[in-house]
Image: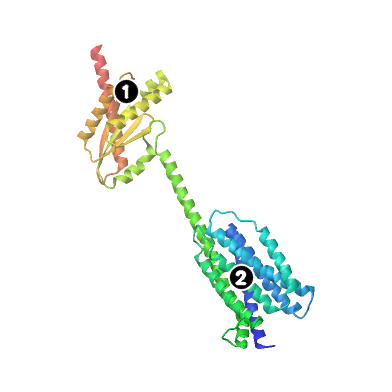
Amino acid sequence: MSTDYLLWLWSLTSQAASATMIVGFFAALRRSFPTAEVRVWTQAWAANLLSLVVTFVDLYWVRSVEGPSLRAIFGLYIFGKAWFVVQMVHGLWLAGNPGAAPRRLRVPAVLIAAASVVAGLYLHDYTLLSLLSQVGIFAGFFLATLIPTANRPVGWLLRGIGLRALLSAVESLIYAAQTAPPLVTLPWTADSLAHFSAVSSSFDMLTEWLIALGCVLAATGRAHRELATTNEELHRVQASLRAMVDVDALTGLASRSALRDVVRSLHGTSAGVLFLDLRGFKAINDSGGHQVGDDALRHFAAVLRESFRPEDVTVRYGGDEFVVVARCVDRAQMMARVDNLRARLAAADGRMPLEFDSGYADLPADGAFDEAIKSADLAMYDAKAAASRARQSLAHITA
């Protein structure tokens, strides 16, 4: 055996082993990333492996045989290489245009099959076969670098494809110089060209790994972007749901659950906490029904909001209980606003008069909110009891 033949055998064996590993890797990758481009790329690498397997069959069983078997080998080789290029370019287009639907390639498949049959019938020279396949790879991959993409997560893939196109151009020139020396002349000896042809599969293998790396980076990059988009959408949905939870549907005030964010927003700032309770709300519900009670709550909430500053937080704490948290106010300022609330409620023409009891507590900058609201609640009950005693005394004097 000649040295060039042994080199070619070693180079081809290395490329076949490499292609087998790539196909196995992409078959596993397809399980983790079942996207259209990964599916197409898996088919592309399988077609590339087919062409190499056919070469091995040719090498060990058919090389010295003429006739239909050799024609079938040549045809399958051309089909495998051509389908590899078409599917690789198809996957590149899918990766560069997220959201695009895979295209049916029936017409290209039929054309490639027809060209493969013609090649099997009329090509009987191995160098000419190699020339034809390298010219096809160069043309397909060169055109692939010109594909417009809406998104460019395919940088490494384009580099690999571009390098493979460049290598195919060089190999095409070498095979052309060997096939038709009068037409193509290169500044190297025939032995040098033969040595390069013998190891060319090794160079092909290196570019194929770069292309495979580009495919993986494009697939994982897309998955990362889709995950980030999904995560952003989830945050928006959570924020929307949280906003719905943090707003009382009946009154439009903040709900009790919103107090946790209010406490966090204080950031060591002092505040005044006011606890309010509608007086005689049960009697309103009993006499007028729940619809009248709901109207009373909505009216009270609207007047409560108007009686305080826009930056003060008004909360429906539960039932007929309300809480106001106001930054940087003292008791006198808060009581002035309470008096304003009473005056507004009393001036509401044509509405059922509403009264309330309230309790106030200071929240120091380093104080605990739970303690402040508990103190305000207790103060409200003290005020309610005092008002009840005052009404009983007034009734006794009137009687």
Of all residues, the one furthest to the front in this rendering is 182
387, above or below 318, in the image:
above
Task: Work out which quarter of the rendered image holds the C terminus and state it.
Answer: top left
The amino acid beneath tag 2 is Ile
The amino acid beneath tag 1 is Leu
Q: Nearer the viewer, residue 203 or 226?
A: 203
Q: Say if residue 29 shows up in the picture.
A: no
Q: Are marks 1 and 2 in contact (CB under 8 Å)?
A: no
Residue 354: which disc? 1
Q: Nearer the viewer, residue 15 or 262?
A: 15
**Crowd around label 2: few <14 · some 14–19 · many ≥20 (10 Å):** many
238, above or below 286, in the image:
below
> In the displayed structure, does residue 362 sit left or right of residue 174?
left
> In the displayed structure, does residue 9 sit left or right of residue 336?
right
**Crowd around label 1: few <14 · some 14–19 · many ≥20 (10 Å):** some
Residue 98 percent across, percent down from the top left: 53, 55
Q: Nearer the viewer, mark 1 or mark 2?
A: 2
Q: Residue at x 33, y 46 (%)?
A: 264
Of all residues, the one furthest to the right in this rendering is 67
Task: Work out which quarter of the rendered image holds the N terminus and state it.
Answer: bottom right
Looking at the image, how many numbered discs can be counted on the residues? 2
Q: Nearer the viewer, residue 340 or 81?
A: 81
Q: Nearer the viewer, residue 275 or 94?
A: 94
Q: Residue at x 30, y 26 (%)?
A: 356
Residue 137: which disc? 2
Q: Residue at x 42, y 38 (%)?
A: 244
Residue 40 percent across, percent down from the top left: 61, 61
Q: Earlier in the sequence, mark 1 or mark 2?
A: 2
